[in-house]
Image (cartoon, rainbow, N blue to C red):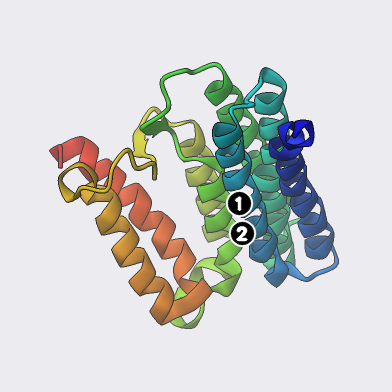
Amino acid sequence: MKILRHLPNALTCGNLLCGCIGIIFVLQNSTWSGILFVLAAGIFDFFDGFAARVLKVSSPIGKELDSLADVVSFGVLPSVVMFQMMDAISSSSYLPFTAFSLAIFSALRLAKFNIDENQTDTFIGLPTPANAMFIASLVYLKGPWDIFISNDIFLVLITATFSFLLVSPWELFALKFKNYQWADNKVRFTFLGISVLLLAVWQLSAMPFVILLYILISLMKRWIRI
């Protein structure tokens, strides 16, 4: 059916819609909802590419639309989350605006991705969905870990670090399986196994640690060739 040709772009628009709604909720001081809409956007983002491959209807306009949606859902939305967190605790009127460097560097990362044909099995720099999930899930930190979101200087340092990671030259593995053999996917299986365990124990509070684990394993894979 010809209508199926439009399914990937419709899913991409769902991603964009989640980003827009998430921004509204965060601006209405429902910051806790931020990660839920980031996760929803991530689901749409996964299935639009999956649908395009299955239906064999990928197109240049679909690629551009995907990046435009990602800028909103995985760039602007986490920036607004970070802005609200900073604004709630900072005595400075200007410091919270540093949060929008996340949106700027997300746009730069996506622009680089669009012209790089080599990022298939690996990513160069932190993918924007992973960055967005880390930032948005900070609001779920509990216990001793919430020190990192109760100090505006810590939040600025986190913003600067993850802005750099978005455009860093470091390779990070992609969760794409060509087969399901342990020898070819031991890094992916290890990451997924530990991540499921962390999420089972800590629920959404585990998400920042899952993203940090992803970065750490990627760097270990690069440096010690595992």
Specify the farthest residue to the front: 1
Q: Residue at x 55, y 22 (%)?
A: 112
Residue 129 shown left or right of residue 122 in the figure? right
Callout 1: SS: helix
Alpha carbon distance from label 2 to label 1:
5 Å
Q: Position of residue 194 (x, y in %)?
A: 30, 66
Q: Residue at x 44, y 34 (%)?
A: 125
Amino acid type, mark 2: Leu
Task: Measuring from the top left, give residue 114's x and y in whole percent.
Answer: 58, 22
Density class for disc 2 (Cα within 10 Å; few <14, some 14-19, many ≥20) is many
Which of the 4 image quarters holds residue 196? Answer: bottom left
Is residue 27 at least partly visible in the picture?
yes
Amino acid type, mark 1: Gly
In the displayed structure, would residue 121 be above or below residue 142?
above
**Against 116, is 23 above or below?**
below
Of 185 and 5, the residue lying toward us? 5
Instruction: Determine which quarter of the picture holds residue 67.
Output: top right
Q: Residue at x 58, y 27 (%)?
A: 56
**In front: 44, or 109?**
44
- Residue 133 picture quarter: bottom right
Residues 38 and 135: in front is: 38
For disc 1, the neighbor class at 10 Å (few under 14, some 14 to 19, many from 20) is many
Specify the quadrant that holds the C terminus. Answer: top left
| Residue underneath mark 1 | 42
Query: What number of labels is visible?
Result: 2
**Rendering coords of residue 223 (x, y %):** 19, 37
Q: Are the residues at dot 2 and dot 1 in contact (C-beta closer than 8 Å)?
A: yes
Q: Which residue is mark 2?
A: 39
Judged from the image, the secondary structure of the residue bearing numbered disc 2 is helix
